[in-house]
Image (cartoon, rainbow, N blue to C red):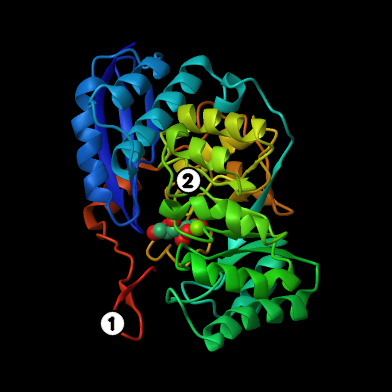
Amino acid sequence: MKITKLTTYRLPPRWMFLKVETDEGITGWGEPVIEGRARSVEAAVHELSEYVVGKDPARINDIWQVLYRGGFYRGGPILMSAIAGIDQALWDIKGKALGAPVYQLLGGLVRDRIKAYSWVGGDRPAEVIDGIRMLQQIGFDTFKLNGCEEMGTIDTSRKVDAAVAVVAEIREAFGDSIEFGLDFHGRVAAPMAKVLIHELEPFRPLFIEEPVLAEQSEHYARLAAQTHIPLAAGERMFSRFDFKRVFAEGGISILQPDLSHAGGITECVKIAGMAEAYDVALAPHCPLGPLALASCLAVDFVSRNAVFQEQSMGIHYNQGAELFDYVLNKDDFKIDGGYFYPSDKPGLGVEVDEELVIARSKDAPDWRNPIWRLHDGTVAEW
Ligand SMILES: O=C(O)[C@H](O)[C@@H](O)[C@@H](O)[C@H](O)CO
Ligand SMILES: [Mg+2]
């Protein structure tokens, strides 16, 4: 079999799908994207396609190594997201060619189901209580919300108290009948992370995510030393070589590689194994679409240290399209009692509504995250 063509479709709300065709009529799909930089990743996919068209799609490992090492420069969000989407599509092709789901090709199920969690509250946590109540109706008991609004390097007690008040209200309303992670979203600098984490400790959030920016990873161990709350990070690290420093320095209890940013299934399975060796949990990051989610689930179902799975249903970013809008076999992704169950469909198990993808790709927005500024006009981390 030979790869014949790569076609990209930028789509609402802020996603990109990649279709990889072969000379035997088997097609694979992937989801290469960096939110807000879709056109950059699209250009990278087409630049890398020179190394992919004409090749045997079965040789996923060799194609991955060529794409990673072949251009001298490597790593980073754009190239690793382009590689991720190509990799996902190659695993999809392999599964379809062999008539097996990707998790079977990776050694089979290590678990019967994986817990899902859902976002509540939007960019600035609001209506969190109502959001949780609504999602509880459909079986969710695990959630994530932004832990604070914009935060200065040194900020006020009022800002800290406002962040803590949201969390106190959740615990007041739900006790320990639910769990929730707090995503600091990289908004908090190390000095304020110490203060915020200390004030949040009594409310026992399930985890605190991106307590500081990935480029400040040396603070993870220091922050972990002051708290019992598990720290989580990984969405802005893009390969084993980024993560190995985090393992060496310590401090992260939950690793969150993004299957559409960190080199795809081939790379993230290896990252998952590294995490297990350090007794670190795996919780793949996934605020994206169905192919990204299916890739996460493939890794979850073969990784014993996977603990819960992010998914974007109802997330505040999904304006203009929802998680399964482009999926024909929606029922294969049902969330039952707050869990995902493995599908026995071959490959990634996503039957893409290609007609809708082609139609909606014509009005794909160039999504951008907002630029926030602090009270003194300096750029804030969003
Ligand atoms: O945890 C999450 O889902 C992420 O922090 C998410 O909010 C960001 O990755 C966002 O997609 C960037 O545009
Ligand atoms: Mg996050």
Residue at x 73%, y 59% (from the top left corner): 228
User: Does the beta carbon of the residue at mark 2 sit less than 8 Å from ligand 1?
Assistant: no
Earlier along the polypeptide chain: callout 1 or callout 2? Answer: 2
Pinpoint residue 234: horizontal percent, then vertical percent.
50, 47
Contact between labelled residues 2 and 1, with CB atoms less than 8 Å apart: no
Q: Which of 266 and 111 is in front in this view?
A: 266
**SS state under label 1:** loop
Q: Which of 24 and 6 is in front in this view?
A: 6
What residue type is disc 2 on? Pro
Task: Pick the quarter of the image with the C terminus.
Answer: bottom left
Task: Pick the quarter of the image with the N terminus.
Answer: top left
**What residue did someone put label 2 on?**
290
Q: Which of 170 and 3 is in front in this view?
A: 170
For label 1, count other residues whose C-alpha is less than 10 Å away and answer few (under 14), some (14-19) or many (20+): few
Disc 1 to disc 2, C-alpha distance: 38 Å
In this view, 1 is above or below 135: above
**What residue did someone put label 1 on?**
377
**Mark toward the viewer: 1 or 2:** 1
Work out whether residue 140 can be spotted: no
Residue at x 22%, y 53% (from the top left corner): 362
Residue at x 43%, y 44% (from the top left corner): 237
Pinpoint residue 132: horizontal percent, then vertical percent.
66, 71
What residue type is disc 1 on? Gly
Work out whether residue 247 can be spotted: yes
Q: Residue furthest right?
A: 176
Quadrant position of residue 369: bottom left
